Image: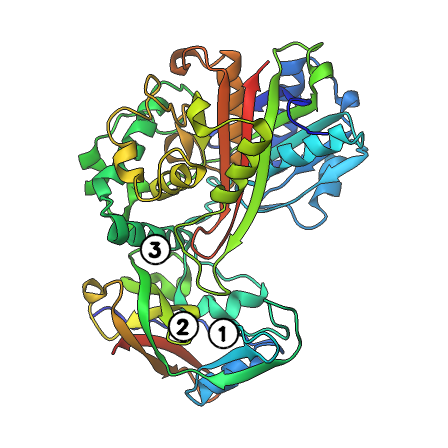
Amino acid sequence: MPAEIRHPKPVPDWETRVFWEGIRRHEILLQRCADCSAVQHRPRAICATCLSSRVEIFEASGRGTVHTYTVTHQNQAPAFRGSVPYVLAYVDLEEGVRVLTNIIGCEPGEVQIGMDVVVDFEDLDEETAVPRFRRA
Amino acid sequence: MSLSGKVALAGVYEHPTRWAPDKTDWQIMAESARGALEDCGLEKGDVDGLLAAGLGMGGLGIIQLSEYLDLKPRFVDSTNIGGSSFVAHVNHAAAAIHAGLCEVALILYGSTAASSAMAIGTGGQAGREPSAAFVAPYGLTTVGGYAMAAQLHMRRYGTTSEQLARIAVQTREHASLNPAAKMRKPITIEDVLASRVISDPLHLLDCCIISDGGGALIVTSTQRARDLRKRPVRLLGCGEAVWHQETGSPDLLTIAARQSGERAFEMAGLTPREIDLAMVYDSFTITVLLTLENLGFCKPGEGGPFVEGDRLSRTGGLPLNLDGGGLSSNHPGMRGIFLVIEAVKQLRGESGPRQVADPALALVHGTGGLLTTQHSGATLVLGAD
């Protein structure tokens, strides 16, 4: 198995704080516009579709499929230098948004486009967690 | 009133350096400015518009550059949309000249990416922009962004690594005819496939090189350009687009070139079929393939077969990246300016051993940013006067 990825910590700002607090509780929180019903991610204070401020939060199922991926063999950033090879991927969530993530828990060569995946939360410390995905 | 044909590239200069530990970005820009002015016979005092972007230029960089060159321009633009910036600068300069905001615009680029040991493609992507928290934990690299597009293209259309490699092989063949190119030794498809995988499915030789370098463009009205030293190259069409995938789930294989290309061809009143040569940003082999599809040179999914054989060679149906591109000639981080320079030289008939026979129309397309996440496209259709 490849070495564990030691994530740089995500740094929330006031627009994304609620999302990262959800991740810490192991919940993926997405946004839906109360005016136009558009679902969006990453979180914003406004609906990017209609510019309404009436943006509501709901919990996603955590299930999705691999839209595309790459097995990264070279990353010179210090946090990732020792973690290659690792799988960088876009996952389409059931709710209709696409997220950048890693696929973990299997050999990189086993990952396929279209593979069903489910969220896996890694607790970095008491304050911070990061969502990644593994085969469903 | 349409811009088409009213404005021209009057002067160009590509800095010959590929390795300049003894120079600064500013110095390379200034030396390039001198070269482009000599090319067209104008003087520094004629310049009243200044446009530039660079990895080392901060928010006030255009003012610092004005001071460095002792220019007091009445039109400035430091739009930075990645490597395509300088192609977009041509559009912006043309609009400004057409509107009477300036008469002679100088577009500059200089970078010491190689001698400063910058890890451009594999250095990780995590800035201070609002989305950084959603990128930084996952190890997105520039090459990784493009590799995910390549993976999807292969899965959906059956495109092969051999087909992508053909682009690198052809580009190297052109570089072998360019004395200034950094990598000139011919390579084979087998060489590309045997080079190490950087981000699956892209190999080392699917990726652009890193070099130092820079260049300059001088844009003015076609009328004024006709009185200058070199035959003008007219701007017949131009277009820009910004594309991103975060909201909704758009198709990752539709890129900004689709929109910027349509806009440029519409303004020019031309189609891809009429183009004699193309200069297309080749950050990676997949960038070229997707750009050709999205500009309409072939249909979506047909890029793999399209680039096979000799079609992209100097004597083929669509001569491409005749200077040796970013894959083999030079890539100091943002190479859009070199696309314009080579297209102009080709249309003037100044490209020596790599010259295409009597081209009348050239297409230039720059891609900036990361193809799968957020990127920009800028397209020019250029014509010999």
What is the C-alpha distance between the residues marked 2 and 3?
Answer: 20 Å
Amino acid identity at mark 2: His
Q: Residues within 10 Å of mark 3 (few under 14, many from 20)?
A: many
Whether residues under marks 1 and 2 lie with C-beta atoms below 8 angstroms apart, the answer is yes
Residue B235: % across, % down: 61, 25
- Specify whether residue A82 is in view: no
Q: Residues within 10 Å of mark 2 (few under 14, many from 20)?
A: some
Residue B160: % across, % down: 22, 44
**In front of the other: B373 or B305:** B305
What is the C-alpha distance between the residues marked 1 and 3?
Answer: 22 Å
Numbered label attached to residue B148: 3
- Specify whether residue B305 is in view: yes
What is the C-alpha distance between the residues marked 1 and 2?
Answer: 8 Å
Whether residues under marks 1 and 3 lie with C-beta atoms below 8 angstroms apart, the answer is no
For image coordinates 23% across by 63% down, the residue present is: A112
Q: Residues within 10 Å of mark 1 (few under 14, many from 20)?
A: some
Residue B189: % across, % down: 21, 34
Quarter-of-image position of residue B172:
top left
Task: Give the side of residue B383 with respect to residue B178, left or right.
Answer: right
Task: Give the side of residue B266 with respect to residue B164, left or right.
Answer: right
- Are both tags, 1 and 2, on one chain? yes
Label 1 sits on a secondary structure element that is loop
Whether residues under marks 2 and 3 lie with C-beta atoms below 8 angstroms apart, the answer is no
Mark 1 highlights which residue?
A10
Amino acid identity at mark 3: Met
